[in-house]
Amino acid sequence: MEENEALETPVEAEVTEEPAEAENREEIKETTEPRRERDKDRPAKRNFKKTNFKKVCLLCQEKSSIDYKEVNKLKKFISEGGKILPRRMTGTCAKHQREIAIAIKRARVAALIPFKAD
């Protein structure tokens, strides 16, 4: 009989813990339900992302070549700090971006464009 009593006590302890867990679950449900009601009252969030559009290479459109002596053209592809702008900002194709980079570097060496903004 003592063995049976020893087996019953751990089972009883488990049974007493389960209702406590159930109460905690109910409390959690109560706290989450008002949030859902609040969300219904709010308008849906708007997505303010920019619509992506493909930039077209200006040099391909004009069918013009790049020369290191044409400083006005090259200044369009340089930032205020004097850095070469990337393709994703200028919209040039890979071929023309390489040509622009070479022309800007040559213009810097020839002192037509400063290496660094003052």
Image (cartoon, rainbow, N blue to C red):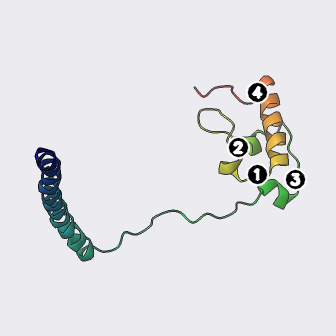
Whether tag 4 and tag 2 are in contact, CB under 8 A, the answer is no
Q: Quadrant of the C terminus?
A: top right
**Gap between marks 1 and 2 measured at Cα:** 10 Å
Q: Earlier in the sequence, mark 1 or mark 3?
A: 3
Q: Earlier in the sequence, mark 4 or mark 3?
A: 3
Circle 1: residue type: Thr
In-image side of 56 versus 45 (left or right) = right
**What's the residue at 37%, 69% (across, down)?**
45
Q: Which residue is mark 3?
A: 64
Q: Which residue is mark 2?
A: 77
**Gap between marks 1 and 4 measured at Cα:** 21 Å
Dividing the picture into quadrants, the one containing residue 78 is top right
**Gap between marks 1 and 3 measured at Cα:** 13 Å
Q: Earlier in the sequence, mark 4 or mark 2?
A: 2
**What's the residue at 16%, 45% (across, down)?**
3
Whether tag 4 and tag 3 are in contact, CB under 8 A, the answer is no
x and y percentages locating residue 97 in the rendered image: 79, 44
Which mark is nearer the camera, 1 or 2? 1
Pick the front one: 15 or 73: 15
x and y percentages locating residue 8 in the rendered image: 14, 52
Please tell me whether residue 9 is drawn above or below residue 41 in the rendered image: above
x and y percentages locating residue 107 in the rendered image: 79, 30
In-image side of 32 versus 92 (left or right) = left
Circle 4: residue type: Arg
**Gap between marks 3 and 2 measured at Cα:** 15 Å
